[in-house]
Image: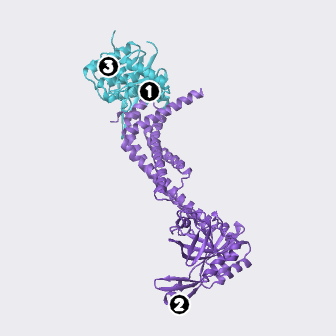
Amino acid sequence: MPQPIVSLQEVRRSYKMGDVVVEALRGLSLDIGAGEYVAIMGPSGCGKSTLLNLLGCLDRPTSGHYLLGGTDISSLDDDELSDIRGRRLGFIFQSYNLIQQLNILENIEVPLFYQGRSEEEARAIAIGLAKRVGLERRLDHKPFELSGGQQQRVAIARALASDPLVILADEATGNLDSTSGREILSLFDELNQAGKTLIMVTHDASVGERAQRVVRLSDGQLESDKRRSA
Amino acid sequence: MTARLQSLFSSRLKRSIRLGLRSLWLHRLRSLLTMLGIVFGVCSVIAMLAIGEGASFEAQEQIKNLGSQNIILRSVKPPEDQKVSNNQNNFTLDYGLKYEDISRIQATIPGVTTIVPARVMREYVWNITLRVDAEVVGTVSWYPAMRNHRVASGRFFTETDQLAAENVCALGAEMAQRLFPMEEPLGKTVRIGEQYYRVIGVMEALTKAKTDDTGQSSTQQAVDRMFIPLETAKRRYGEVLFKRRSGSFERERVALHEVTVKVEDPEQVVAVSLAVKDLMERNHKKKDYDVVVPLELLRQKEKTKRIFNIVLGSIAAISLLVGGIGIMNIMLANVTERTREIGIRRALGAKRKDIVTQFLIEAVLLSGAGGALGVLLGVAIPFVVSSFAGMKTIITPLSPIAAFTISALVGVIFGLYPALRAAKMDPVEALRHE
């Protein structure tokens, strides 16, 4: 296997809830290579969300190491983490999380502006991505004017804006009807075929089956790690 | 390179401002209500300052008209004698400044250059059928120079007129207008009682509002004055004046009604005025005179103005404080409401300082817009006041600029805490927020 893009080494994450310390992740080790399409599955409370937050650099491990593209993020400060989120990661959320007062184009541009790209550059990239997800006719619409499936496609375009190393999807089809869900999943397939690394969290087995590799968590630990033979 | 960075920075700032405007526009009513505190604060301070400045300017003008190097002595009817005169119908009141007072001042007080004596009589002045109730002032030829009251057309009377006790007069500007509405007054005659006087000059109009000499009771109606040579006044009227008062006569003997003393050195005005007061006190048993020192009045006015400004400043500070608290309150609500947006932005790469900037700009836009609106209103109100109420108002250029700057600063100060709170949020928590 080539040099992994994501590498978790003995990662633990515990929370204090009052006097009780809850361990959400207990020594998880996982390597994900470039271009992989991974589904993380497991029952609720198994630590999926915690893992996703860590992978997304929104949180830091209590102990252990997380290397993203060779950088150990456990040693970075808040500004550096923000920068990594903006440049190397793309987020897709269950509830789309578009900014309501911005139109489609502006929503796609948001990550670019935090990296200090110029207005013209950002606009050009955003228009290209909107075309790629099939929304070039809706550029000046507001999110609430779009269907769930369309909103999620905007979110995908936004996640692609800064050409990230890894795309993280959190129950991306959870709020969608089956037709739009299928559309989104085929978009994921397309992205993966184009060489993007995709990590998605889901509890839906049918969704998980689309991935090449299924990682199952249970009680904060790795339960199984199966690769689908192509 | 730096140019590129600069343009990047300014485009980023422009974008942030656009974004801020948009989210304020989203909650138009709320933003407007929040701004009102600042609007009223700024507008009332600018308006009050302009009106106060105008009033004090007028007062100062008026005092300057009296001459800052002058000391003005005036005869005043002693209050206790008034009662006596009411009881005894034929009693002649004898009070006021005497010719001896002048010679005493000249003889004993150094630094006094010129002295202007004047007799003042209240009379009806006629031009055929037009009548004006005026003060007829018998005085000397150098009165205009001493009192900064110049002749607008024609001339003032001269020493020659004085010696000959000519029946000539110079009219106050308003009075001339009223007596001769359609014609040129110069060369015409006016009548007082049985005496006719030739008009040889018309005085300049005094500062619009008032000619009240004390500069104190500025509400008093402007008094029309007509000037005649002192010698003429003495001969035509004598020293005893009659006053008819609801059925009873009143007789007063007053030698001089008004004496203006000019002090050579402006620095010595206060010292000389003390000496004059002292001298008068020794020679007048009753307090039948009054000493007005315009310079002292000027100083007093300046002091009052300072106090006025301090009070105004405190009001401004309080209203801006209240306005600022309003902004803080709304910004805190705003931050809570947009917790999720903050989470999204953080996930997409926004640094803490980006979030701080975003919310700070919104707060500053609120307070700045409030300040700008307040300045507009604050400039408009004095304008309306002066055009409708006829009051003089002065807007010093500093006050709108300072008011606007301070209100923008209020936005920074009171927006900082909510903005920092927004930035401090944990992105994971913020994203989970409903």
Q: Amino acid at mark 3?
A: Ile
Chain B colour? purple
Q: Quadrant of residue A55?
A: top left
Of label 1 and label 3, which has the lower sequence position? 1
Q: Which mark is residue B177?
A: none
Q: Amino acid at mark 1?
A: Pro
Mark 3 crowd level (few <14, some 14–19, many ≥20, 10 Å Cα) = many
Residues beneath discs 2 and 1 located on the same chain: no
Circles 1, 3 touching at the beta carbon (< 8 Å): no
Which quarter of the rendering shows the C terminus of chain A? top left
The residue wearing badge 3 is A184
Residue at image position (43%, 41%) is B421
Q: Identify the subunit bearing mark 2.
A: B
Q: Which mark is residue B90?
A: 2
Mark 2 crowd level (few <14, some 14–19, many ≥20, 10 Å Cα) = few
Chain A colour? cyan
Q: Provide residue A130's location: percent of width, then percent of height.
A: 38, 20
Q: Identify the subunit bearing mark 1.
A: A
Residue at image position (45%, 36%) is B358
Mark 1 crowd level (few <14, some 14–19, many ≥20, 10 Å Cα) = many
The residue wearing badge 1 is A111
Q: Is residue A220 left or right of residue B238?
A: left
Q: Provide residue B260's location: percent of width, then percent of height.
A: 65, 73
Residue B420 seen in render: no
Q: How is the image coloured?
A: by chain
Residue B156 seen in render: yes
Tell me the distance, in whole angstroms, between the alpha carbons under discs 2 and 1.
102 Å
